[in-house]
Amino acid sequence: MTWFYEHYKGVSAVGVHTEKLLHESSSKFQSIKVFETTGHGRLLTLDDMVMLTELDEFVYHELLSHLALCAHPSPAQVLVVGGGDGGCVREVLKHPSVERVVQCEIDEAVTRVCQEFIPSVAGGLADPRCELVFADAVRYVREHPATFDVILVDSTEPIGPAEALFGADFFGDIRRALRPGGIVTAQAESPFYAPEVVRGLFAAVRPLFRHVHPYMGFIPTYPSGAWTFLFASDEASPADIRGEALDALDARYVNAAVATGAFALPAFARDLAGSPG
């Protein structure tokens, strides 16, 4: 047994006690590892950065998925950008109105590893409503205008292939890829350790959509534990989130009360996102 540490930008480290390395490989894009841990279930890392643990991944995937899906009156066509582990697809498929969910992931190896070693997260990828696309999401979004009701941007941090997923050009293409009334949510990094990413993302997106709102959740194995998300739409706002729909879900983190509280940000995070309140 040993410890896995993710050292984040030279300012912090998160340690997880591991029992065994179950898988190690290198794809065209990154190194992929899966560990069995003492208290966190299975751990997935990409380039030695924590992507998920079975202990707390549900918090991230539920927050990224359900608030948008419960704000849309009847989401039928959903796109997950990135999200190769399948966690967002698992959550999307809990909504009976969904007819198709496309997961567009650039690295097929990540998905195949998760299907084999972390089926608790990736099990939904075998559902007939799920379409797996292994391609550059920037190009895919650009080539599919007016196609999706909800788009979930489940990206890694903005380095390498994921860097373009935080820019104004990409979110302009997302706006065009949405149907009328469409909603996009995205992970927006740590307000403590990546304030420049939070600030830059909201500055890029705010001119593109009528409604742009930050919200937050708490994920123990992510740097600082506090994580920021983005909600944007031309028509929908957080006021449209149906609390009764959230409460009826098979969910472990989100409910009507959590959804309300998630948008009540501390002042410093609200200021990063340029939100008036």
Image (cartoon, rainbow, N blue to C red):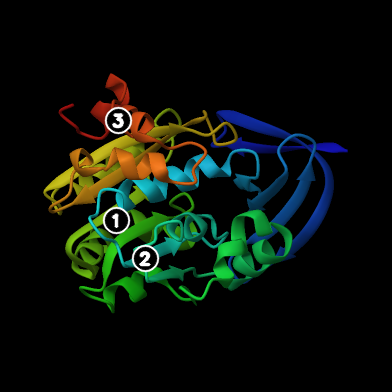
Q: Earlier in the sequence, mark 1 or mark 3?
A: 1
Q: Going by the picture, which residue comes out furthest to the bottom?
A: 143
Amino acid at dot 1: Gly
Please provide percent x and percent y for residue 111: 60, 66
Which disc, if any, is residue 98?
2
**Which residue does the image show at 35% across and 65% down from the upper left?**
78
Mark 1 secondary-structure assignment: loop
At which x and y percent is residue 140? 35, 75
Pick the residue in front: 64 or 252: 252
- Residue pointed to by mark 1: 167
Q: Earlier in the sequence, mark 1 or mark 2?
A: 2
Q: Residues within 10 Å of mark 1 (few under 14, many from 20)?
A: some
Residue 180, how many percent across, how many down?
Answer: 15, 64
Report the front residue among 121 and 158: 121
Residue that label 3 marks: 260
Q: Residue at x 60, y 46 (%)?
A: 52
**Residue toward you, 120 or 3:** 120
Q: Amino acid at mark 3?
A: Thr
Disc on the earlier residue, 3 or 2: 2
- Mark 3 to mark 2 CA distance (whole Å): 24 Å
**Residue at 54% in and 37% down:** 9
Pair 1/2: label in front: 2
| Residue 85 seen in render | yes
Horizontal side of 36 relative to 46 (left or right) equals right
Few, some or many C-alpha atoms within 10 Å of disc 3 (few <14, some 14-19, many ≥20)? Answer: some
The mark tally for this picture is 3
Q: In which quadrant is the C terminus drawn?
A: top left
- Residue 48 horizontal/vertical position (percent): 66, 49
Evaluate if marks 3 and 2 touch, with contact meaning CB atoms under 8 Å apart.
no
